[in-house]
Amino acid sequence: MNRLIQLRRTIPSSFIAVLTAYFALSPTIRGQSCPSHCDSNYNTGEGDYVLHYTSTGSHNTAVGNTVLYLNTTGSYNTGIGDYALFSNTTGIQNTATGHGALNGPGFGSVTASSNTASGFKALFSIRTGNNNTANGVETLFSNTNGFDNTANGFQALYSNRTGNFNTANGEAALLDNTSGSDNTADGVAALLSNTTGANKTATGWQAL
């Protein structure tokens, strides 16, 4: 019997069909372990232009279009959502979840580190401020250099730029604060109109 005919009879037709389909697919679809971006420095990214300028930065994770776009040497950062951590260049240990979270000033340099932002444009304007936590839509939106601030709730500490050690819990809490420090506001619109005052505590709806 012809050996070729015998081989065709031995191999199931379904198996041949699977092999044909497999080799017709692109390398990515065939199970390539690397997503749209990965490198020897343990950086992983999925989305257009993620980690675009990363050089020696390592252990970064970027998911979404232009996430960590300007990053160069920053390491141990995680960005999830379009434009998250867009302007981060050398900052480390930042976590941004949400569209534009920890975005930064366009093509300006951002060196801020150890920040956590969860929500649409949370900590959107960050530059050098460290150790901030923002949970909610546009929380700490204007913060550039302020550090050790905590904001929970829609637009809490929205206007803060350089104030430090502030805590705002509730929608619009410490909304107008720009440079005041060491303030604590618990409740919707608590300390809403405070701008530069320091060492204030307010609890309740529209308190102080």
Image (cartoon, helix red, strand yellow):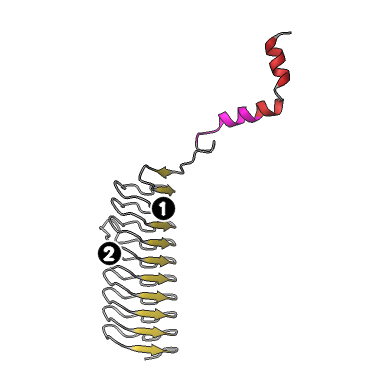
Question: Circle 2 — which element?
Answer: loop
Distance from Cα at disc 2 to Cα at disc 1:
20 Å
Residue under label 2? 127
- Residues shaded magenta: 18-27
Counting every numbered tag in the picture gives: 2
From the top left corner, tell me how far across and down residue 33 is, in percent: 49, 41
Question: Circle 1 — which element?
Answer: strand
Q: Which mark is residue 204?
A: none
Q: Residue at x 43, y 65 (%)?
A: 120
Residue under label 1? 61
Crowding around mark 1 (Cα neighbors within 10 Å: few <14, some 14 to 19, many 20+) is many
From the top left corner, tell me how far across and down residue 131 is, in percent: 33, 69
| Kind of residue indicated by mark 2 | Arg
In which quadrant will I find the N terminus? top right
Crowding around mark 2 (Cα neighbors within 10 Å: few <14, some 14 to 19, many 20+) is many
| Kind of residue indicated by mark 1 | Thr
Is there CB contact under 8 Å for labels 2 and 1? no
Q: Residue at x 38, y 42 (%)?
A: 39
